[in-house]
Image (cartoon, grey):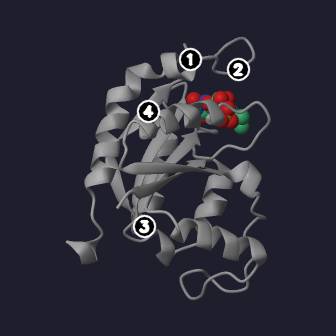
Amino acid sequence: MAKKIGIILGSTRPGRISPAIADWVAAGIAKHPELSVEMLDLKQINLPFFDEPTIPSVAAGVSKAAVAWREKVLSLDAFIILTAEYNAGYTAPLKNALDYLKTEWANRPIFIVSYGFGGGASAAHQLSEVLTRIGTVQIEPNIAILIGDKLNANGGIDDPHTSLAIHNDELDIALNAIEAWTPPEEK
Ligand SMILES: Cc1cc2nc3c(=O)[nH]c(=O)nc-3n(C[C@H](O)[C@H](O)[C@H](O)COP(=O)(O)O)c2cc1C
């Protein structure tokens, strides 16, 4: 059965480059007939700062936003997280989105695509620690995009399919791993 991949866009500011990177990832997924894609744009999903009365490891959130986010995550098989590096860490909207859930992340394949002037290495490292703690299955090695030579004068990426093509093979390897992955109970 085709696996459904959610691309989580971790940045939400106007003018962000995550949609361009997400388009490139989606094009890579489109080359795999056994995979389908859904964009999980945290700007559009617009989760409030976590404000649930019960911690997610004990009980699922009850707000409309928490219920919708949980259902969305449970409806998908694997995730590709796009994270910018902000002040040597990953983004706040991304941490917030992760914190809304706990057991729902366990045993889910997740692949990190980080980006920044040093490839977002610190962001990816911190994110990886969190993903380990919440029990995800990390697909490795990550992709780390050096953005310094890819940004236009406005800080955008004009043609992600060309400028990110250098990472096509890495993306393909990760997508093959996601395709081949089977949940523990199906092994
Ligand atoms: C608040 C903030 C902090 C940043 N800190 C870093 C940093 O520590 N390292 C880095 O390589 N780039 C840093 N940058 C530059 C970002 O990598 C660059 O702006 C990138 O486009 C951000 O992703 P986005 O466009 O999806 O928001 C920072 C950008 C912002 C907005």
Q: Is residue 100 visible?
A: no
Q: Are marks 1 and 2 in contact (CB under 8 Å)?
A: no
Q: Residue at x 35, y 44 (%)?
A: 175
Q: Which mark is residue 69?
A: none
Query: Which residue is denoted by mark 2 in the rendering?
Result: 155
Q: Residues within 10 Å of mark 1 (few under 14, many from 20)?
A: few
Q: Residues within 10 Å of mark 4 (few under 14, many from 20)?
A: many
Amino acid carrying label 1: it is Gly
Look at the image and tell me in which quarter the N terminus lies: bottom left
Q: Are marks 4 and 3 in contact (CB under 8 Å)?
A: no
Look at the image and tell me in which quarter the C terminus lies: bottom left
Q: Residue at x 31, y 52 (%)?
A: 179
Q: Residue at x 77, y 76 (%)?
A: 64
Amino acid carrying label 2: it is Gly
Spot occupied by residue 127 in the image (x, y as percentages of width and height): 49, 52
Disc 1 from disc 2: Cα separation: 10 Å
Which numbered disc, 4 or 3, marks the residue closer to the eye? Answer: 4
- Name, please, the residue furthest toward the left: 187
Amino acid carrying label 4: it is Ala
Quadrant of residue 134 within the rendered picture: bottom left
Query: Which residue is denoted by mark 1 in the rendering?
Result: 148
From what the image shows, is residue 119 above or below residue 84?
above
Cβ(mark 2) to ligand 1 < 8 Å?
yes
From what the image shows, is residue 29 above or below residue 155?
below
Q: Residues within 10 Å of mark 3 (few under 14, many from 20)?
A: few
Q: Which mark is residue 133?
A: 3
Q: Residue at x 57, y 34 (%)?
A: 23
Of mark 1 and mark 3, the one earlier in the sequence is: 3
Amino acid carrying label 3: it is Arg
